Image (cartoon, rainbow, N blue to C red):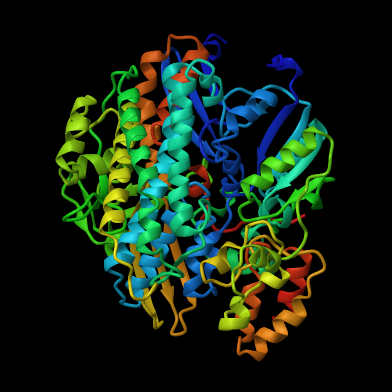
Amino acid sequence: MKETSQKPKLAVWKFASCDGCQLSLLNCEDELLAVADVIEIANFPEASREVIPGPYELSLVEGSITTPHDKARIQEVRRQSKFLVTIGACATAGGIQALRNFKDVNAFIDIVYAHPDYISSLATSSAIADHVPVDFELPGCPVNKQQLLEVIIAFLHDRKPNIPHHSVCIECKQRDTVCLAVTQDIPCLGPVTRAGCGAICPAFNRGCYGCFGPMETPNTESLADELRDKGMITEDLLRLFRTYNADSPAFKMESERHE
Amino acid sequence: MSEGAKTKIIKVDYLARVEGEGGLYLKIHDGKLEDVQLKIFEPPRFFEGFLRGRKYSEASDITARICGICPAAYQMSAVHAMENAFEVSVDGPLRELRRLLYCGEWISSHTLHVYMLHAPDFLGYESAVHMAKDHQADVERGLQLKKIGGEIMSFIGGREIHPVNVRVGGFYKVPTKREMQGFRATIERARDAALETVNWVSTFDFPEFEQDYTFVSMQHPDEYPMNEGRIVSNRGLNITAANYDDHFEEIHVKRSNALHCVMKEGGQSYHVGPLARYALNFDRFPAHIQDVAKQAGLGKVERNPFRSIIVRSIEVLYACEEVLRIIDDYQEPEQPFVKITPKAATGYAATEAPRGILYHRYKMDEKGDILDANIIPPTSQNQKMIEDDLWKFVPQYLNQPDETLRWHAEQAIRNYDPCISCATHFLKLDVERS
C-alpha cells in the first residue's frame, strides 16, 4: 500500500444540490475501500470530519451557484484543484433550481415571507462552467455511479474519461427495449437525451424525461414537432424540456420556442 | 477586559458526516453555556416556488430532487397527497410495492447513517474509511447491507437515487412474481447482516443522557408506520395529515436557512424520527423483533438520543423482514396503476421518511396544475429539538478541551441524522441584484 502522502488527493465539494451525486460515490459499496486505498479522500465532509489541506489532484463539484458566497467559493475551489470535474445536472446545467431563471423574480418576492432579509440569494442558478474553467462535465440527475468511477480513474491516470455522447436510443437498442415512441406513442425524450442512465425509464415502460440533459447536437425541434403532431399541447412541451437540465443551451432554446 | 477573557466561542464551521451544509456555534461565558446555534447555510432552492404551474403528475419526480438520500420518501408523500386530493385509493399489491420501495430506502439510508456517519463517533474515528483500518469486517458488512437497500430501490424503482418508476396511482411497471422470488436469497443475507448490526451497535458506549421528549410520529392500526396512518404524539395528539397545519407551525430564525418547527399549542419543540416511531409503535413490531430490541438493551420507549443508532438498526432488521413478507405474499396486480382524474382540490399527506414525518400539501386547479405547495421535512421539525439537546447535553463537557467538547456536540447533532439539504429547500426568494 502506498504511503498516505504519496496518494493523489481527492476533494468533493457541495454547492446548491440534493447530495445525491456525491452520495453516488458512497454508493460504490464494492469499490469504496479499494478506491480509498489508492486515493487520499482528503476533503469530503459528507463522509469524513478530517480535512487535509489542498492543493487537490482532483476536485469533484456537486451543485450549482446560487448565492454570492458560493460565487466566491468556487473560485477558491478552482485555485486549489489540478482537475475540476462537475458531477451531475446541478453543477453541469444549473439543476432543477434553475427553473427560477425563467421566472420573473418578482413572482417569488410577492410571496410574503416572514424575514426575507435573513436570506441571501442570487437571481439565477448557474452551472459551474459559467464561473470557472471546468476540465470535465459528467451529466445526470443523478450521475451514474459507474461513470463516476470511470471519471475518477481516468483523471488519476491522465487520460480522457470514456463517457458516451450519443443518445438514450442507443442504450434502448443495447438492452433490447422495444421503442415506446414507435410502438405505443408514449412521448419520449430519448432521441435528444444523452446516454448514461442505461435507458432505465423505457425499460420501465415510461418515456425518457431527459434527466441526463441534451446529447451532442440534438434535434429537439424535430422531436417537439412530432410530439405536437401526436397531440401534445404547448404547455406540456414547455414543461417537458424545462426540468432538471432546463438551463442547458439546447433544452433552454427548445423550451423557449413553446413559451 | 477580564470579562472578555472569560468568554469562549466553540465553532464547527462545516459539520461533517451530515447531509448538507451546516455549522455549530457555542458561546461559553464564565464557564456557563450562553448560546447554542445550529446554523444552516445550505443555499435555499425554492421548490415550493417553482412547483407552482407544474402538473400534479410531476410533483413526485421534482420533489425527489430535494434529497438524494431519501428521494422515495418525497415521492411517497407527493403521490399520497395527490391521491388524497383526487380521492383515489391505492390498495392491494400496489400498496405493498410502495412499502417495499420504502423498506429499501429505510435500509439504505439508515445503514449509511449507522455505519458511515454515526458509528465513527462512538468508536473514535474521523470516518468509516478510517474506521475500516481497524474494523474492516464491520464496515464491509455495513457496505453490503447498504448496497442491498439500494438494490431493492433499483429493483422496484429503476435506480436507487431518484427512482423513475413511481407515479400517482401506482407504478409505470410492476415486477412479476418470479422476479420478486428471485430476490429472496439476497434479502435473507441482508436480514442476517441487519441482526449482526443490532448486536454490534448495542455494544457501543452510550453517554448517560435522556430527555422527556414530545415524540411525534405516524401510527397505523396494524403495522409499523411508513406510508399511512394518523399523526400521533405521546402527549395525546391524534390527527390526520389534513390537520397538520392546525397543530404545527414554522418559525423563521436568522441563523438558519431552514425554518424551525414548533407545536402551536405551547410553542415547544418536538422529536420526529426513529425514536419517536419506536416509542409510539413498539407493539406493532412482531414479537421476535421486540425480543431483539430487549436483548439489545432497549425498553419500549427509548429517551436517550445516542441510542437511536440501535433503534435505526432495529428498523433496518424490521424492514428486511417486511421485504421478505411482501415477496412471499405478492400477487401481480392486474394494472400497474389506478387511473387518475384530476380536479380542483387540495391534498395532504404525511409519510415516515427515514428521519421522520415528511408532510406535503398541494392545491390544484381543475386541470390538475399545482397552484400552491407546502413541504415540511423531518430535519426542520427536529432542528429546534437538536438545539434543545445541546443546551442540556453540552454543559457537562464545558471543562474539557475544545476538541473533546466539539466531538461530543457533533455526535449529539448526528443523533438526528440531520438532512440539511432537505431542511433548506423551501425558503422563498430574496434577490441580491448584481
Q: Quadrant of residue B280?
A: top left
Residue A181, quarter of the rendered image: bottom right
Tell whether B371 sits left or right of B394: right
Left or right: residue A89 compared with residue B241: right
Please name whichever residue, B175 or B89, is drawn nearer the observer in this view of the structure. B175
Which residue is located at x 46 percent, y 80 percent?
B368
Please state which of residues B209 and A169 is positioned toward the viewer in this rendering: A169
Residue B402 in percent (x, y) is at 51, 13
The count of marks equals 0
Asked if residue A107 lies left or right of residue B375, the reply is right
Compared to residue B5, the image places residue B34 above or below, namely below
Q: Nearer the viewer, residue B211 or B89?
A: B89
Q: Which quadrant would residue B397 be assigned to in this image?
A: top left
Residue B409 appears at what percent x and percent y? Answer: 44, 23
Visible residue check, residue B418? no
Residue at point 71%, 42% (across, down) = A150
Instruction: Quadrant for the N terminus of chain B, please.
Output: top right
Is the residue B334 above or below the residue B148 in the image?
below
* Whole-percent x, y for residue B154 in the image: 49, 53
User: From what the image shows, is residue A76 above or below residue A117?
Assistant: above
Please tell me which residue is depicted at 44% across the width and 13% down the height of the picture.
Answer: B30
**Quarter of the image containing the C terminus of chain B?**
bottom right
Q: Is residue B223 left or right of residue A90?
A: left
Q: Position of residue A180 (x, y in %)?
A: 59, 77
Q: Identify which residue is drawn at 41% across, 32% down.
A: B114
Look at the image and tell me whether residue A219 can be seen.
yes
